[in-house]
Amino acid sequence: MPDIQFRFSLPKLVHSIALFSDLGIKDLTKLKVVKLLFFADKAHLLEQGAPILGDSYYCMDYGPVPSLALNELNDALLRNEVLDSSPDLTLIDQVLRVRKSVWKKYPLFESKTNWDRTVFADSECAVLRRTIDTYGNFTAHALVELSHKEPTWIIPNKDREAGGRVPIPYELFFDGCDARGKQHLAQLVARFRGEAMEMPGDESYRQFGSELLDHDEDIDWSVDRDHRSRRALHCA
């Protein structure tokens, strides 16, 4: 059965971190970054039917983790400091720097340039800013504790060995969501699996899932209504 998948966006990863830095989020360690990204992705997925990063998530010791983003951050931390004049600058090196200090246990990510507003849809910018307002002042470990209360960690963690990781299906992000989130899930199930999901609630919601299969061509699959040409979803 096909998984619900999205296209990973490296520019959105890089400029999300730059936005965090530009707006004054303190102690942007790798751990804090991936926690903030998780909460932003979840919020946008439930509200708009697609995450911001489009990453693949795994259940790990420190909660749900966007795996491709984690790889990019690990690579950046392993690289020696790159001169701005180097012809081999990656996108991360162009936009971000890693600040290492004897006074800090873990390296911090900081922006070199202003974040690029144009890589995001309006709804993505709104969710990122709300994530900063809600979670920006939390420590990394406080964010880990919050993420350990999420179904996306609790449920897959039952089958995970200590120190290991297991994939998190995107369906788990919708566990306990409201009617709007259930509609987005029904759209994704119809899109990726060709199945009609039974909808709870009144008659209009119950009909919603089955109508998706009959009117697939009429569905606007864009992430944001102001960016109709931008398609965030793709079938594997």
Image: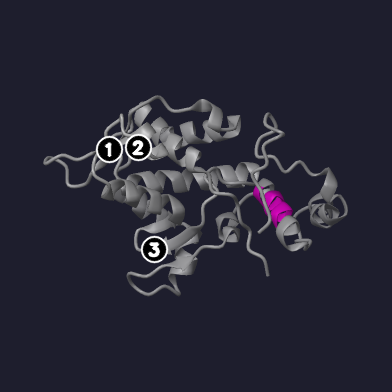
The residue lying toward the viewer, choosing from 197 and 11, is 11
Q: Which residue is mark 3?
A: 60
Label 2 to label 1, Cα distance in Å?
Answer: 7 Å
**Which quadrant of the view contains residue 86?**
top left
Amino acid of disc 3 = Met
| Residue 99 magenta-highlighted | no
Nearest to viewer (mark 2 / mark 3): 2
Question: In the rendered structure, which disc, 2 or 3, sits on the residue that comes first in sequence?
Answer: 3
Q: Position of residue 97 (x, y in %)?
A: 30, 35
User: Can the viewer see residue 23?
Assistant: no
Stretch in magenta? 181-188
Amino acid of disc 2 = Asp
Q: Which residue is mark 1?
A: 82
Q: Are marks 2 and 3 in contact (CB under 8 Å)?
A: no
Q: Are marks 2 and 1 in contact (CB under 8 Å)?
A: yes
| Figure disc tally | 3
Label 3 to label 1, Cα distance in Å?
Answer: 30 Å
Secondary element type, mark 3: strand
Residue situated furthest front in the rendering? 87
